[in-house]
Amino acid sequence: MPQGESFTRRQWYTLISIGCVHFTSAICVSLQAPFYPLEAENKGSTASEYGLVFGIFELVSFISSPILGKYMNAVGAKLLLNSGVCLAAVCAILFGLLAFVQGHVPFIALSFVVRIAEALGSSAAVTAAFSITAMMFPHSVATTFATLEVFYGLGYIAGPSIGGVLYSLGGYVLPFVVMGSITALAGLLIYCILPPLEIGEDVQQKGQLMKILKVPAVVLDIICIIGTSMSMGFNSSTLEPHLREFKLPPFALGFVFIISGGIYALTAPFVGRLCDKRIYPKKLMAVGNILIIISFSLIGPAPFIPVPTKLWLCILGLIIHGFGIACTLVPCFIDALRSAVKWGMADDLTTYGLVSGIWAASFALGDFIGPSVAGVLFDTVGFRTGTLFIIVFQIIVFTSVVSFLCWERKTRVSVMATWNHEENKADLLGSVKIVSNGYGAVPTTEERAEIPS
């Protein structure tokens, strides 16, 4: 849809439906963080064990998301969306009922089983949602994607905050039963209002996934997404025990957990608008890497900052972290999509599904590594020293992004020199048709404007 035009009724229905998906998916991800670690410890579990319970969700998502994205065109985006939300809702309720399981081993084993099933449902819903967004709003993908991420941020807020109130009223079980039931109702709403999607004929996608993974820009986007989600997963599994010394009530603890997601929700639409106005996404990614480095230096604080752990310093770090993840997650999605199309992929649901699956898988891999490593580090060296894992990784990512930008700038100079040479040749020979094939060949006038400065 060209900018400046209003949404159609069909697009408004789609926005509401996809917004519900992002909202409920965020609830599924964030609800466990403030309450599950203490419940698991009461059952005899260690931080390493419940860190893996957090991480297995993302490992399953990492494996399943590309597969779901690859075959979405054959299964149907709407069917995949509806079934995923329903499965995630049922599993959210079951996760609350784990409180009635007696014994350390049965509790941990069933925690893994429920989280694996929940991950399959959430992956199906999110992958389908990303693809539908790209298909329905082709002229404002970044802005629409970022606006819908507001719903993810709201869900990230609603999970711990409302869960904290419910936990105070009814213990561990009540938050999961109530929020799981709300997710089920949201699934029914999505089924009723999401319009039928005309996706055309099924397209053969053999080899397309590997073709996308050979695009250097996409590989860098994947690494950046992994690093960002690692930072989020690190906090989700170990921030609560790190803050336990402050003896915060459940409601206050839930509020701390919503800070990062709340800032992300507020700033993501602005970042998406910047991307749609052709501010090069990778420049925003570099800014996001720096902000995440600063945030983790404060949350601990890191060992090289010689001050004790302070609540206000941790909150300041979480605020900066929210800005950081907005400046990485939104630009990475739109940059991966544009790069895939630029390198010859079809501009259709086939590519949208693959890119969505890759984005979700990359996010999931980081969110698996984050809490899994965080649990081990918390048990061995503590939270403060453990933050160096995230800080060092983000420094590596930042260096890679800056190096890529420098390489692209050199490539741009070479391309523009070739363009001027061909333009002069056209003046001499009469007329020459200049054809573009990415940034490696001579650009047309339209594509010349898209070359990053």
Image (cartoon, helix red, strand yellow):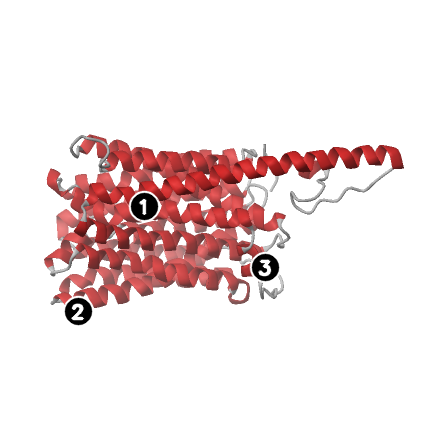
Which residue was labeled with disc 3? 199
Label 3: how many Cα within 10 Å (few below 14, some 14–19, many 20+): some
In this view of the protein, which residue sits in the foreground, 127 or 57?
57
In three-dimensional space, the C-alpha distance between marks 1 and 2, rounded to whole angstroms, equals 28 Å
Which amino acid type is shown beneath numbered disc 3?
A: Ile
Which residue was labeled with disc 2? 106
- List x then y, in percent, for residue 257: 25, 42
Which amino acid type is shown beneath numbered disc 2?
A: Pro
In this view of the protein, which residue sits in the foreground, 46 or 113?
46
In three-dimensional space, the C-alpha distance between marks 1 and 3, rounded to whole angstroms, equals 34 Å
From where the camera sits, is residue 318 visible?
A: no
Does label 3 or label 2 sit earlier along the sequence?
A: 2
Label 1: how many Cα within 10 Å (few below 14, some 14–19, many 20+): many
Which amino acid type is shown beneath numbered disc 1?
A: Met
In this view of the protein, which residue sits in the foreground, 204 or 16?
204
Who's the residue at 28% across and 47% down the image? Answer: 234
In three-dimensional space, the C-alpha distance between marks 3 and 2, rounded to whole angstroms, equals 44 Å
